[in-house]
Amino acid sequence: MVREQLEFPLDGRTPIRDRRVLWAMKTVPRHLFVRKEDMICAYEDYPLPIGWGQTISQPYIVALMTEMLKLAPHHRVLEIGTGSGYQAAVLSLLCKEVYSIEIIESLAKEAIKRLQRLGYKNIRVKIGDGYYGWPEYAPFDRIILTCAFPKVPPPLIKQLKRGGLLCMPLGPRYGIQYLTILFKMKDGSCRIKKETPVRFVPMIRRKNLSE
């Protein structure tokens, strides 16, 4: 997976260069973050369903978004969309702390058990609406969203440190989305740079769950 999909991709896409990211992708056992019936294809080059209409992202996209964050060992990272916990596990090997929010209670509880069982001690998971972030632990050096939304949620911009980065798939539920980096400048202003076109599941809000 790491050699053929990330480091030396066979389809001409941009290789993942960050050696620490490649190491983390080699280290985290992806097959333990998918459903039992999908273990046989856990390392293939596509996303997989994890229930409740959600997916574990394609390995290349997980690595690409992780690389885009430019993580340092002292960073504290907020993740929106825990899913099975795979992205959080990758992040946890490259930074100090990961705070992850999942709105679907069943997925969150499963992820908490899985991460604890596998020994990831620097990850905190809570059940909640990721749109509002986790203000009790803000500000964060980096923020990553593993679900698409038409705009960057203002509460997350507020919780991002000055000098920090936010990475997310930006775009509508049905339409073109782009992996996007938001840079929060030292003066508090923001710059946005759109990168790779992608297709992510949309962000779920509390009001959607109650409809």
Image: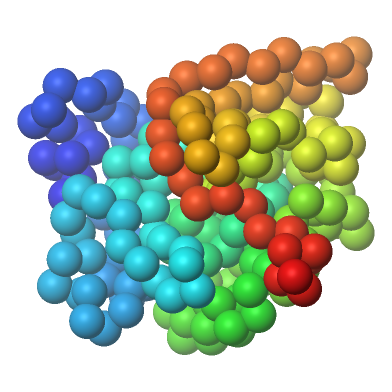
Task: Judge by depth and name the residue closer to the eye, 95 or 126.
Answer: 126
Residue 7 at x, y percent in the picture: 20, 33
Residue at position x 85%, y 15% from top? 189
Q: Residue at x 59, y 36 (%)?
A: 172
**Residue shown at 36%/67% (left/top)?**
49
Q: Nearer the viewer, residue 12 or 26?
A: 12
Residue 205 visible? The answer is yes
Residue 143, quarter of the rendered image = top right
Q: Is residue 31 left or right of residue 197?
A: left
Q: How many marks?
A: 0
Question: Can residue 89 be seen from the camera position used here?
Answer: no
Q: Residue furthest front?
A: 211
* Horizontal side, residue 120 vs residue 75: left or right: left
Q: How is the image coloured?
A: rainbow
Looking at the picture, does residue 181 appear above or below residue 57?
A: above
Residue 86 % position (x, y)? 44, 63
Q: Quadrant of residue 6?
A: top left
Where residue 193 sits: x, y (%)?
59, 15
Residue 74 place in picture, x, y as percent: 66, 43
Q: Considering only vertical position in the picture, is 114 above or below 134?
A: below
Q: Is residue 35 above or below residue 1?
A: below
The residue located at (89%, 54%) in the rendering is 135
Looking at the rendered image, the quarter that the C terminus falls into is bottom right
Height in image: 197 above or below 153?
A: above
